């Protein structure tokens, strides 16, 4: 079986503009989109550039747009597409070459929300206690693999690159919900702004494309409730 | 570019832990973290099962020590193991304090699970994505330290060494194609393993032995390279890892007749379904289980999945709720990659190369033979695993020795003032610029890395697999050396500078070739069977302490074949005994 | 060197998911019309003539069409809102989280109860 695969190429050292290139690739039931790309690189055109590593949907390297939808190349299969495949770099990011986008744009947002446990030192030689119920409260949001698919799905991020975005907010929320954490007050100022949770209009597509079931849209909108609360508290404190 | 006190190469678990330790040791210290991928892409992310530390009241350091030393068939450095088991718990607690979402018991205490070759439940876990959660916890924690300067997607190609002392590294900035000589008083290699030297493996595409080869080319020994761990449960075709925890939680292995074949290979008697027992049957060590697969294959008792010989992992009796709580990732992987629902179906599996026990030789403090150069994690051979690693020891290793390396390197940087030879650095830089220019000079017409890589991984699989023979190893060694010759003519098709992944993979292959030569040479010279290294030749099928209770050390020779020497093993705490599991193990323990 | 495609005005036509989202957002339009009609009704209470004129306006077929649309739109909006609610306000009872299906069902039964109550109070003539 063969399939036509179109790739949106960008070779800034040779062409000023991106262009489409078509390849014919053999496939079977198990061929992933990433597998097809690797076939192209090894057999047809070694200049095609893309990121990948674990090929088991946990490292988060291989996010691309496949027929207009953000996908992990290793967890999306050629068999799913009866017609041709069109592979593009992740939407809403700056493209630096072929399928390579500037992931720093995501990392800056991630760093801004202080995504780490902020807590007074407890007993240094003993773990905290945390019941399975307390763990369950945030566990889903801790499953984010930083692949960036949710950013490529989010039109608000597309319109406003300053929007902190679904993935980073999900991780901020993950720490806010952690029973061991005391850093919420430090994270909320970032989330309270227009570029924080309030840029979100609950399109919800971010959660649809998330390969790990994180549901970042839920995190952002739970964040709105928290943000409203924290702003009210601030208002009253400020007034008093 | 500025000069760093500690420069870490590799952003996986070991590298991040080292960088954080260095930053904590000297809050104003200058630390660089270079990684060829964004740190959260590092292969630590794919570890599933857990991290070991003595935790329960009925457990002891002595027991963890004994399991590790026997598991490594007495080729572990016993002083190192002793230090490791004593530091392990505190490091896991530290991870907890940094927010790692460890799975919990009902009362809120950390939960521990069974693991192969471990006498007692002592493996901490975060569902079946322990490595993922540890890596992200470490990466996110590292963001707290503003003195850790990250260089993401900087591909280190060489070390700057001056008169036996480290001066820094040479790195290729992937986004621009520019080479940088980055000066540092100390360098910590944390570059991971070399599983991609083999065709069928559980490793990510980035696991290509880069750091091992770099240190090796500068004269540091690669130690115990013949010990390559086959994980017994990889998915057929892809090699994707199905965690040992699935057996720790009670999964069983059956052959095509539905028979639990492990009882035929010194691991029995059969334990009842749903009642796994430590060190019996499916909870034997990885080397024994992978070897049992090979034996079943020889007897024609394996099944077939898309052209691969397989046995089956049965998880059905665990029930849907338990599987989704404890092994959600496994359920997802099985569904996506072999279209199997473990709740109702058997998962086809076969052994796949998983881990390199050997690596850059270091002393117990992670220092190498080059002053100021340290190595930690899978790329290093600190002597913890001996001839076979026990599952869940390596995630803890990243932490225990990552911290130690970070502290040691920072201390060394602050007490020594290495002679920085700018001319020599500039010279190395020029050589590499020349080399890269030659590689990318013209659109390839000759040999490509793709061809060579295919031949390399095939010959490693053929000659250096679960069971090895003299003739097979001879053939592989000749082949690897021939490929090294051919590499001299290699050309890269992509002539551009920015994001030239074609060039990167070509350079990775060169690292692979050097590491492969060391693996095959050490395998050939070790004419006995021990742990993960099994020989079929006459007189070599058993362990031979008389001649081979020694580490192998392979040394690089430029323009010539690598050479091998032997090094004594530290057996000061436990004299080599019989390594047995199942009922036999119980008996020999009683004696 | 790099490029970044701008999001076009027609981004929401790209696929089904975005169109459904825009439809959800568009439900506000007939509802705004209904609201204005009701406000006008309240305002018209000041004089009998005005009220009769308002009644005439409310009986016009195109107004009825828009108000029917508003009813459908509010149901569609409720449908999407009820589906999203459990994700924004997850409820946990002890160790277990309340399943989304239960929460959605509870919201619909609440809605139906209110409708039934209104029919009973004011719908005698129906």
Image (spheres, coloured by chain):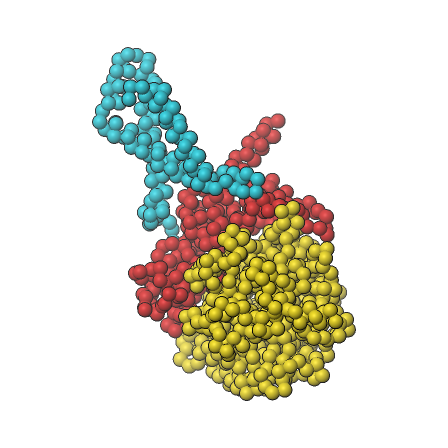
Give the position of the N terminus of chain A as an image quadrant: bottom left
Q: Position of residue C105 (x, y in %)?
A: 42, 36
Q: What shade does chain B have? A: yellow
Task: From this view, report whether residue B134 is shown above or below residue B256.
Answer: above
Q: Position of residue B352 (x, y in %)?
A: 52, 71
Lateral position of residue C55 relative to residue B505, left or right: left
Q: Residue at x 66, y 59 (%)?
A: B122
Task: Give x and y (percent) for residue B72.
Answer: 66, 72
Q: Is residue C20 visible?
A: yes
Count of numbered circles in the view: 0
Q: Nearer the viewer, residue B234 or B473?
A: B234
Relative side of B461 to B581, left or right: left
Q: Residue at x 37, y 26 (%)?
A: C116
In the rendered image, residue A130, in percent from the top left (x then y), is placed at 63, 46
Foreground pick, B354 / B586: B586
Q: Colour of chain A?
A: red
C82 or B68: nearer the viewer:
B68
Specify the colour of chain C.
cyan
Residue B161 seen from this side = no
Residue B326 is drawn in which quadrant? bottom right
Residue shown at 52% from the left, 46% from the top: A169
Q: Residue at x 24, y 23 (%)?
A: C59
Q: Is residue B365 above or below residue B134?
A: below
* Residue furthest left in the image: C61
Q: Which quarter of the picture shows residue B430?
A: bottom right
């Amino acid at each position: 079986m063969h399939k036509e695969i179109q790739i949106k190429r960008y070779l800034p050292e040779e062409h000023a503009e991106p262009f489409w290139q078509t390849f014919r690739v053999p496939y079977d039931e198990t061929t992933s989109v990433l597998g097809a790309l690797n076939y192209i690189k090894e057999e047809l055109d070694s200049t095609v550039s893309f990121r990948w590593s674990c090929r088991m949907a946990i490292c988060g390297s291989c996010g691309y747009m496949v027929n207009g939808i953000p996908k992990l190349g290793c967890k999306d299969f050629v068999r799913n597409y009866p017609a041709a495949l069109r592979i593009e770099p992740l939407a809403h990011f700056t493209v630096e070459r072929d399928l390579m986008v500037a992931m720093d744009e995501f990392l800056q947002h991630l760093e801004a929300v202080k995504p780490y446990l902020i807590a007074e030192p407890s007993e240094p030689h003993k773990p905290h206690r945390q019941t399975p119920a307390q763990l369950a409260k945030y566990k889903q949001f801790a499953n984010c693999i930083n692949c960036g698919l949710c950013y490529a799905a989010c039109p608000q991020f597309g319109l406003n690159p300053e929007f902190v975005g679904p993935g980073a907010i999900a991780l901020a929320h993950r720490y806010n919900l952690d029973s061991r954490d005391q850093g919420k007050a430090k994270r909320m100022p970032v989330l309270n702004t227009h570029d924080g949770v309030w840029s979100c209009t609950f399109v919800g597509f971010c959660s649809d494309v998330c390969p790990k079931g994180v549901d970042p849209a839920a995190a952002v909108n739970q964040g709105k409730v928290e943000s409203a609360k924290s702003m009210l508290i601030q208002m009253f404190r400020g007034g008093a | 570019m500025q000069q760093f006190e500690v420069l870490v190469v590799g952003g996986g678990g070991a590298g991040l832990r080292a960088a954080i330790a260095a930053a904590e040791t000297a809050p104003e210290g200058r630390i660089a973290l270079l990684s060829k991928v964004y740190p959260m892409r590092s292969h630590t992310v794919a570890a599933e099962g857990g991290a070991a530390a003595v935790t329960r009241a009925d457990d002891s350091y002595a027991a963890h020590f004994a399991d590790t030393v026997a598991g490594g068939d007495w080729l572990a450095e016993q002083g190192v193991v002793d230090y490791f088991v004593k530091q392990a718990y505190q490091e896991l607690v530290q991870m907890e304090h940094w927010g790692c979402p460890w799975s919990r018991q009902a009362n809120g205490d950390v939960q521990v699970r069974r693991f192969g070759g471990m006498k007692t439940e002592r493996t901490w876990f975060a569902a079946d994505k322990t490595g993922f959660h540890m890596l992200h916890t470490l990466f996110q924690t590292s963001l707290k330290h503003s003195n850790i300067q990250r260089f993401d997607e900087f591909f280190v190609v060489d070390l700057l060494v001056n008169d036996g002392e480290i001066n820094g590294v040479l790195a290729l900035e992937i986004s621009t194609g520019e080479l940088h000589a980055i000066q540092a008083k100390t360098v910590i290699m944390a570059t991971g393993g070399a599983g991609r030297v083999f065709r069928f493996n559980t490793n990510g595409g980035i696991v290509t032995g880069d750091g091992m080869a770099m240190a090796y080319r500068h004269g540091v020994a690669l130690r115990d390279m013949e010990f390559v761990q086959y994980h017994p449960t990889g998915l057929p075709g892809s090699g994707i890892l199905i965690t040992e925890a699935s057996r720790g939680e009670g999964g069983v292995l059956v052959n095509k007749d539905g028979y639990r074949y492990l009882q035929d290979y010194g691991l029995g008697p059969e334990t009842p379904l749903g009642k796994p027992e430590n060190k019996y049957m499916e909870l034997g060590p990885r080397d024994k289980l992978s070897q049992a697969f090979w034996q079943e294959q020889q007897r024609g008792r394996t099944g077939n999945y898309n052209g691969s010989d397989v046995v089956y992992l049965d998880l059905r009796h665990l029930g849907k709720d338990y599987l989704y709580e404890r092994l959600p990732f496994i359920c997802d992987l099985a569904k996506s990659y072999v279209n199997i629902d473990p709740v109702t179906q058997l998962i086809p599996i076969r052994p796949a190369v998983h881990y390199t026990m050997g690596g850059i030789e270091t002393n117990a403090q992670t220092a190498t033979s080059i002053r100021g150069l340290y190595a930690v994690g899978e790329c290093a051979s600190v002597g913890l695993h001996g001839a076979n690693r026990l599952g869940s020891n390596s995630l803890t290793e990243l932490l225990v020795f990552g911290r130690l390396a970070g502290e040691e390197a920072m201390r060394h940087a602050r007490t020594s003032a290495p002679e920085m030879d700018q001319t020599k650095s500039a010279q190395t830089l020029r050589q590499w610029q020349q080399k890269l220019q030659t590689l990318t000079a013209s659109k390839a017409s000759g040999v490509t890395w793709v061809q060579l890589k295919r031949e390399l991984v095939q010959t490693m699989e053929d000659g250096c697999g679960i069971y090895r023979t003299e003739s097979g190893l001879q053939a592989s060694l000749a082949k690897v050396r021939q490929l090294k010759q051919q590499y001299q003519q290699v050309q890269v098709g992509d002539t551009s500078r920015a994001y030239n992944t074609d060039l990167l993979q070509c350079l990775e292959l060169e690292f692979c070739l050097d590491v492969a030569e060391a693996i095959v040479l050490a395998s050939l010279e070790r004419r006995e069977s021990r742990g993960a290294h099994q020989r079929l030749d006459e007189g070599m099928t058993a362990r031979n302490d008389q001649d081979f209770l020694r580490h192998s050390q392979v040394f690089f020779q430029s323009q010539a074949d690598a050479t091998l020497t032997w090094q004594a093993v530290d057996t000061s705490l436990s004299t080599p005994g019989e390594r047995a599991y199942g009922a036999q193990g119980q008996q020999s323990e009683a004696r | 060197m790099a490029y970044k495609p701008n999001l076009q005005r027609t981004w929401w036509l790209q696929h089904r998911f975005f169109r459904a989202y825009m439809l959800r957002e568009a439900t506000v339009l007939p509802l705004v019309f209904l609201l204005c009609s009701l406000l006008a009704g309240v305002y018209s209470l000041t004089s009998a003539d005005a009220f009769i004129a308002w009644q005439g306006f409310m009986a016009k077929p195109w107004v009825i069409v828009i108000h029917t649309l508003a009813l459908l739109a509010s149901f569609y909006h409720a449908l999407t809102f009820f589906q999203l609610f459990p994700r924004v306000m997850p409820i946990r009872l002890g160790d277990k989280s309340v399943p989304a299906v239960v929460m959605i069902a509870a919201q619909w039964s609440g809605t139906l109860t209110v409708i039934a109550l209104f029919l009973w109070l004011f719908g005698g003539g129906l």
